[in-house]
Structure formats: structure tokens, C-alpha cells
């Protein structure tokens, strides 16, 4: 397992101290978009301990700040009877709007990956061992179309998958939007414009090997499938 780093927690967020860490992977079989591996430096920031829940998003819709997610699939969580599921089927703009409505923003890719890997550069949030259905809600195996579960599980309900900073569900459950435009390789991280935004962490419909801490996926402005959700972050005053 990982060596936990004690960090401040407040209002459902944890404060990641920032610092130097290795982003991306040198693993030969990894997709080209995770390369070249490089050392990054991040300032401190706060990040939500869990993915944004249906209940939290419903409150934003009720206050007229957020738009109700469109039903793009029977597996979208917004209309499920469980407010503790992660909200899914949200477009990038919806995620951004929600975060702003609560005085936050979407995390950058650098912040997201540091939250998931810590300074030691673990492969998965919980360490280097391969996921199973007790740790991550993904497909059962890479070559299987069958999922561990038919839908996401409740946010933060599996403490065993916590990252070194105690951030939960960074692997599997729902893929998470970041604020960054997508770039094809790590040398051009966070371009000023683009066609799609970066998604991180994989979801319940993602194969286990594509739910690593360095995995990078993308979605267009209209992407709003049941595998997609988000969490928020905010600046930390040093």
C-alpha cells in the first residue's frame, strides 16, 4: 500500500501541499499520450475528497445555477433514487459551472495527477498493485466487456482506494473532467485552445489498465455519457 501523507481536510476537501513529482509514464506499452514522462512542479491546492454527488448537483439545479444533465443513457445517475452516487452525464461546461457556483474550479491535469500519485509516483492511487473490484469500479478485466458493477458506486464508499493524500475514487467509478484542453502528448500540456478537454481516472465502463493515475482520455464539448463525472478543486493560499 501507499505511505499516507497527513494533510489538512476541510469542507470535504483535502489540501495537497504541491511540490515536485513525476508525471506520465515510461512504461513501454502505455499509450503515447502519457509520454514523455517528465518532472512537474505544482503549487499547493485543495481538491474534493470525493466525486461530486447527485445530491450536491441537485442542490445546484434547485438554486438555478446549474442545468439538469440530459439523459443520454439509462445509466445516467441524476434520476436514480440515490443522492450519494456520483453525478454523471455532465458536459464539461456543466462541471465547470457547478464548481464555480460553489466557489471552486475544475482541477488542472497536473493537480489531478499529483492528487492520484503523490510524490512517489504510484501507478494507481492505492499503490502499484493491479486493481480488483474491491478497489476500483471498472470493467472486470481488460479484455472483458463485463463491469465489476452495473453502475457507479456511492462516492467515497471504498476507503481502501484512497490516494496518499486521502483522495477517494480517483481510479474507476466515473472519469473526471479537468480544466485543461487535451494535448496529444505531455510535452504540450494544457494548450491554450483545443477541440476537447482532458478526462482522468477512468470509470465503471473503463478497462482496469486505462484507470491508472497517468491515464489520459478526452471528451468533446458535447460528451456527457454515464462514464463521465467530475470533482472540483481550488487554489490554496500558501
Image (tube, rainbow, N blue to C red):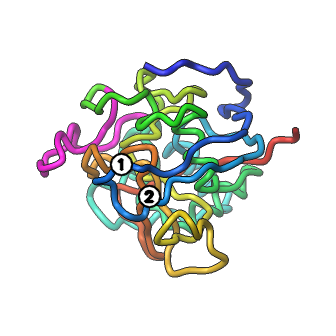
Q: Between residues 94 and 58, which one lies in front from this camera angle?
A: 94
Give residue 120's position: percent from left, percent from top. 55, 31
| Residue range corresponding to the magenta coloring | 135-155
- Image: 13 above or below 25: above
Q: Looking at the image, which residue sits at the far right?
A: 238
Give residue 117's position: percent from left, percent from top. 52, 37
Query: Is 41 included in the stretch rendered in magenta?
Result: no
Q: Secondary structure at mark 2?
A: helix
Say few, some or many: other residues with alpha carbon within 10 Å of mark 2 (under 14 / 14 to 19 / 20 or more): many
For marks 2 and 1 on the same chain, the one whose residue lies earlier in the sequence: 1
Residues under numbered marks 2 and 1 in contact, where contact means CB atoms less than 8 Å apart: yes
Q: Between residues 120 and 53, which one lies in front from this camera angle?
A: 120
Give residue 236's position: percent from left, percent from top. 81, 42
Q: Between residues 123 and 125, which one lies in front from this camera angle?
A: 123
| Residue at figure coordinates x 55%, y 26% from the top left | 164
Per the image, the residue denoted by label 1 is 27
Q: Secondary structure at mark 1?
A: loop
Per the image, the residue denoted by label 2 is 34
Whether residue 118 sits left or right of residue 169 in the image: it is right
- Image: 136 above or below 209: above
Q: Quadrant of the N terminus?
A: top left
Q: Secondary structure of the magenta portion, mostly?
A: loop
Whether residue 178 sits left or right of residue 225 in the image: it is right
| Residue at figure coordinates x 41%, y 34% from the top left | 154
| Residue at figure coordinates x 52%, y 70% from the top left | 182
Amino acid at each position: 500500500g501507499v505511505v499516507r501523507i497527513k494533510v489538512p481536510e476541510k469542507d470535504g476537501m483535502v489540501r495537497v501541499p504541491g511540490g515536485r513529482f513525476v508525471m506520465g509514464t515510461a512504461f513501454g506499452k502505455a499509450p503515447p499520450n502519457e509520454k514523455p514522462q517528465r518532472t512537474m512542479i505544482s503549487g499547493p491546492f485543495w481538491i474534493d475528497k470525493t466525486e461530486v454527488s447527485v445530491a450536491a448537483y441537485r442542490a445546484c439545479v434547485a438554486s438555478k445555477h446549474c442545468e439538469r444533465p440530459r439523459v443520454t443513457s439509462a445509466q445516467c445517475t441524476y434520476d436514480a433514487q440515490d443522492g450519494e452516487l456520483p453525478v454523471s452525464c455532465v458536459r464539461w461546461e456543466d462541471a465547470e459551472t457547478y464548481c464555480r457556483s460553489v466557489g471552486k474550479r475544475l482541477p488542472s491535469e497536473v493537480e489531478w495527477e499529483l492528487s492520484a500519485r503523490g510524490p512517489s509516483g504510484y501507478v494507481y492511487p492505492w499503490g502499484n498493485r493491479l486493481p480488483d473490484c474491491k478497489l476500483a469500479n471498472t470493467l472486470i478485466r481488460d479484455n472483458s466487456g463485463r463491469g465489476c458493477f452495473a453502475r457507479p458506486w456511492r462516492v467515497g464508499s471504498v476507503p481502501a482506494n484512497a490516494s496518499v493524500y486521502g483522495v477517494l475514487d480517483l481510479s474507476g467509478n466515473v472519469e473526471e473532467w479537468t480544466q485543461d484542453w487535451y494535448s496529444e502528448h505531455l510535452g504540450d500540456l494544457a494548450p491554450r485552445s483545443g477541440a476537447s478537454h482532458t478526462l482522468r481516472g477512468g470509470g465503471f465502463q473503463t478497462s482496469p489498465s486505462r484507470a491508472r493515475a497517468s491515464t489520459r482520455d478526452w471528451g468533446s464539448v458535447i460528451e456527457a455519457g454515464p462514464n463521465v463525472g467530475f470533482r472540483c478543486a481550488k487554489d490554496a493560499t500558501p
